[in-house]
Image (spheres, rainbow, N blue to C red):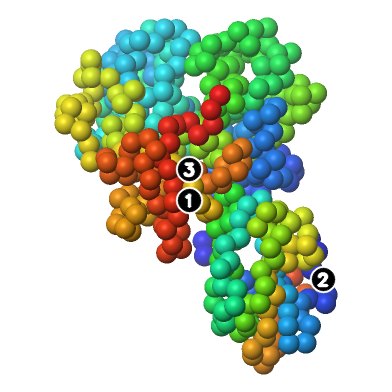
């Protein structure tokens, strides 16, 4: 399993790629592997500001449903439209074509609470 | 937390599944493979070619003696007197309060020898229940811990297995079995049954021959693209056929009449709770199990509420998934009688939002 060094991670198995005040969020290689074949994303919070740790959407695999949690308090500016027709991109390319949302970070102070790759790997025991 | 590893039962192939890369999960007290590679790929393999499931966690009881049929007739709802040697019947064990102890298969080996195949999660419950009603001096033996079971399912199953037995597999009728030499092992039960709707066989072998027979099947099936299939795909395959899963669609509190199992509930004989079930059948019930297909994007899951157009609760989902074959949300659930008619418009409440669905005739997957 792959956990790029340049990304930050959450305890809820999201990754976040920070670019100034904006960021891209997805789910980790570990998460997609645990979920199995992903068949649906239910995200209708675009345009809303969601607090850190709150649910911004749901991912459904064949066998399981999981909530998606906001890494840092942010406004959701975009949902990856490609996931509507091809949610399996998250299985095949979780850090690339399988990105989930773009956000405007509202509270940058929270970034320091995120995990780096080493800490995340320790969390999941790899 | 308690270390579940130490209390979970292991099937004979436990280490082999792990070596094959399976994700193992606790299921009915056993450590079982839920997925080897991909739920969807495994599902499609069974629909299009052939796959093998290790379902050794299932329970098997032998019922022997002169009173065997009388005991079976007393505890099961279907009419086992209709069975001939080598014939199998789907049936259920009604409880005394209108519910179902378990659903099961009844195998008739001969007039004084039957085998009952029960759900893994209910082995102890069923054993105690059947034993407690054995006033017929039948000899009961629980062979679950000595018996491995492989389901080889898919349109290529007969071809893939034919080299392992002299039995003409493609000529076998659905729900019949034979006790034969299979993969050089004597007295193997080869049964033309399954839980997928894809056709195929279930193979009962003694535990000490399990690894050998599995490897023989894998070898024979190689040319046909055989793959090991996990319990994840087993669930989506059975749901596409509208088959009930005990613990989801039927349980201690659902009656066979409500569950549309009237066809295995025969009132020409006396069995546990038959009088009250007959009354239910005659007077009608207030809810029934139906199948439904989502008309809007969304995936139904068990315990979601089923509501009418105004949001009033009319039932509850018992099983649901995205159908891998149909690429749409499908499910089963109990709804109040006015909504059981085919084409009824119902709504599934998914994360506090109503999603339109339509009641359909089962199975979801038409032949």
Left or right, B153 with reference to B114: right
Q: Tally the marks.
A: 3
The residue at which mark 3 appears reads as B293
- In the figure, B78 relative to B279: above or below? above
Q: Answer yes or no: do the residues labelled 2 and 3 have beta carbons within 8 Å?
A: no
The residues bearing labels 1 and 2 have C-alpha atoms spaced at a distance of 35 Å
Query: Residue A89: which numbered mark, if any?
Result: none
Give neighbour class at mark 2: few <14, some 14-19, many 20+ (Cα, 10 Å).
some
Say if B326 sits above or below B310 in the image.
above
- Classify residue B252 by image quadrant: top left
Residue B126 placed where, x, y %? 36, 34
Q: Nearer the viewer, mark 1 or mark 2?
A: 1
Q: Are marks 1 and 2 on the same chain?
A: no
Task: Identify the residue under disc 1.
Answer: B300
Q: Are marks 1 and 2 in contact (CB under 8 Å)?
A: no
**Do we see residue A8 in this rendering?**
no
How far from the left and from the top, in percent, is residue B261? 34, 29
Disc 1 is placed on an element classified as loop
Q: Nearer the viewer, residue B289 or B118?
A: B289
Name the image quarter holding residue B137.
top left
- Visible in this render: residue A107? yes
Residue behind mark 2: A4
Q: Position of residue B292 (x, y in %)?
A: 44, 41
Task: Name the chain letter of the residue that bears numbered label 3.
Answer: B
Rounded to the nearest angstrom, the CA distance separating label 3 from label 1 is 9 Å
Quarter the N terminus of chain A occupies: bottom right
Q: Mark 3–mark 1 contact, CB under 8 Å? A: no
Letter of the chain that mark 1 sits on in the rendering: B
Using residue A17 as the reference point, say whether residue A87 is left or right of it.
left
């Amino acid at each position: 399993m792959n956990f790029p060094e340049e990304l930050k991670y959450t305890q809820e198995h999201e990754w976040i790629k920070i670019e100034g005040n904006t960021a891209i969020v997805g789910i980790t290689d570990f998460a997609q592997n645990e979920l199995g074949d992903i068949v649906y994303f239910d995200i209708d919070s675009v345009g809303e500001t969601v607090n850190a740790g709150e649910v911004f959407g749901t991912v459904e695999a064949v066998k399981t449903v999981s909530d998606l949690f906001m890494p840092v308090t942010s406004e959701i500016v975009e949902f990856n439209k490609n996931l509507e027709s091809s949610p399996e991109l998250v299985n095949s390319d979780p850090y690339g074509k399988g990105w989930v949302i773009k956000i405007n970070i509202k509270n940058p102070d929270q970034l320091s609470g995120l995990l780096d790759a080493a800490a995340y790997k320790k969390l999941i025991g790899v | 937390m308690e270390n579940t590893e130490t209390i979970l039962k292991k099937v004979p192939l436990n280490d082999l599944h792990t070596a094959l890369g399976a994700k193992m999960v606790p299921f009915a007290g056993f450590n079982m493979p839920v997925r080897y590679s991909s739920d969807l790929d495994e599902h499609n393999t069974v629909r299009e070619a052939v796959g093998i499931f290790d379902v050794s966690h299932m329970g098997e009881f032998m019922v022997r003696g002169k009173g065997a049929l009388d005991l079976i007739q007393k505890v099961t709802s279907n009419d086992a007197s209709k069975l001939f040697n080598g014939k199998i019947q789907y049936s259920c064990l009604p409880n005394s309060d209108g519910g179902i102890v378990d659903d099961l298969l009844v195998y008739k080996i001969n007039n004084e020898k039957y085998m009952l195949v029960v759900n893994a999660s209910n082995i102890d419950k069923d054993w105690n229940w059947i034993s407690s009603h054995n006033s017929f001096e039948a000899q009961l033996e629980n062979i679950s811990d000595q018996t491995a079971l492989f389901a080889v399912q898919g349109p290529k199953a007969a071809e893939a297995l034919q080299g392992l037995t002299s039995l003409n597999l493609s000529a076998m009728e659905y729900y019949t079995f034979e006790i034969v030499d299979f993969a050089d092992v004597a007295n193997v039960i080869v049964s033309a049954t399954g839980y997928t709707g894809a056709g195929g066989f279930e193979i009962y072998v003694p535990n000490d021959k399990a690894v050998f027979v599995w490897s023989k099947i894998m070898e024979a099936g190689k040319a046909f693209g055989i793959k090991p299939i996990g319990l994840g795909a087993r669930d989506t395959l059975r749901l596409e056929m509208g088959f009930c899963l005990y613990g989801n669609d039927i349980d201690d509190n659902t009656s066979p009449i409500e569950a549309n199992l009237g066809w295995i509930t025969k009132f020409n004989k006396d069995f546990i709770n038959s009088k009250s079930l007959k009354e239910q059948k005659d007077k009608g019930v207030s809810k029934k199990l139906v199948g439904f297909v989502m008309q809007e994007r969304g995936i139904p899951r068990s315990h979601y509420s089923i509501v009418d157009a105004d949001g009033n609760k009319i039932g509850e989902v018992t099983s649901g998934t995205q159908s891998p074959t149909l690429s749409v949300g499908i499910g089963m659930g109990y709804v109040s009688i006015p909504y059981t008619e085919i084409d009824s418009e119902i709504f599934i409440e998914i994360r506090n939002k109503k999603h339109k669905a339509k009641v359909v005739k089962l199975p979801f997957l038409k032949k």
